[in-house]
Each structure stands twice: as C-alpha cells, then as structure tokens.
Amino acid sequence: MNRRSVLSLALMACVAFAAIAQADVASQESQTKLKATINNCAVCHGLNGHSVSPTFPNLAAQQQIYIENQLKAFKGETRSDPDAQAYMWGMASQLSDQAVAELAQYFSSQQPPPAEPGDAKLVAAGRKIFLEGISSEGVPPCASCHGPNAAGRGMFPRLAGQHAPYLIKQLLVIQSALRSAPVMHGIIKDLNRTQMQAVATYLASL
C-alpha cells in the first residue's frame, strides 16, 4: 500500500470518528432535553406518570398512541375543555413532534399506577356497567372499546388505575360537550352522576 492510500484511509477514519462523536453529542443533548421535559411533566403527573393529585391524570402505562393524540390536540388547541386550556395548551405548544413521540413512549412504558380501593357496592355497580353496559338506556359496555381489564386499546385510553375524580370530571365535560368527543358523548349522554361515580370508583380500584 502506497503512502497516498495510507493517508486517504487515515483521513476517512478521522471523518468517521468525527461523525460518530457528533452523533454521540447529539444523542446526549437529546436525552438531556427529554429528561428536562419529563421533569416538567412530573410536576403535575409524577416522575413515573403516577400523579399524586386527582386533578391531574396518571399517565403511567397509558396507551402510547393515545398520549400522542392528546398532546397533539393540546398543541393544536383542538381539545378545549377548561383544564386543557388552563394547564396543557401552553405546555404542549413548546413540544416538537419528536418530543411528543418520546414522551408518549416514556410514559406508556412505565409501570401502571396502584389501585385505589373504593366502596364495595360502588365498585360492584361500576363493574357491571363497565362490562355489561346499561341495555335499558342504550349504553354499551365500556369494555367493548377500553378492553375487559380497562387497559385500553390503541386510540382508546387506559382507564384502569385512573383517579376517580379525574374520570368523573372528564365524563362530565364530554357529556356537556365542553370536550369534543362525539362517540363518547353519544354513549354517555344519559349517564347520571351516580352511575359515573360507580364506574369511576370501579376503574380506580383496578
């Protein structure tokens, strides 16, 4: 091998090493930025997605595509219920598409939140509504979309282990059309507050 070939190979090796080093730096910067964003989310939702306040939902083990869809709805200001406007529009406005995907992946991969035991009669009543619906009122089983264990399915969110007050609040804003969810609005439009309480208590107990 002549001197020119050796120099050429050495130059190519230097370029390759430089590219790898740049990629490592970019990856480290990306991870640092993601960690900072997760820490911001943790103020309300908990570091591992286990919220300590019923005002804010648990995100741990939530369906990944559901988290992505909701963050995009907040960012686009198409989810317009009062809490979305007060808390999430501003937060989500700063997120890139990459950050949305990374946050969804992170929280969806966390361990589910712990169950919240509730009144046995309410739990039993809520379980019946969730699994069987209310045929006399045309309410289909919630499990048909959210799964028999309420773990969610793709675009349909996980409900198991969610704070009961948060679930009731969402049912109310959907029922009153403050939060746009046409399919859910049609399903729950005739649910009363007692029925909502029962379903929410059951789901929190899972």
Image (cartoon, rainbow, N blue to C red):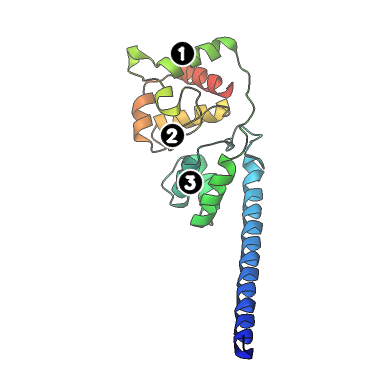
What residue is shown at x 46% (from left), y 42% (from top)? 65
**Taking 9 as reference, is 23 above or below it?**
above
Q: Quadrant of the C terminus?
A: top right
What residue is shown at x 64% (from left), y 62% (from top)? 29
The residue sitting at the front extreme is: 1
The residue sitting at the bottom extreme is: 3
Q: Is the residue marked by circle 3 packed among few (<14), some (14-19), or many (20+) residues within 10 Å?
A: many
Q: Which comes before the other along the chain, label 3 or label 2?
A: 3
Tell me which corner region of the image, top left, top right, bottom left or bottom right, holds residue 19: bottom right
Q: Which residue is mark 1?
A: 128
Q: Which residue is mark 3?
A: 68
Residue 61, image x and y in percent?
57, 36
Q: Which of 157 and 13 lies nearest the eye of the viewer?
A: 13
Give me the C-alpha separation between circle 2 and circle 1: 20 Å
What residue is shown at x 64% (from left), y 78% (from top)? 14
Q: Amino acid at mark 2?
A: Phe
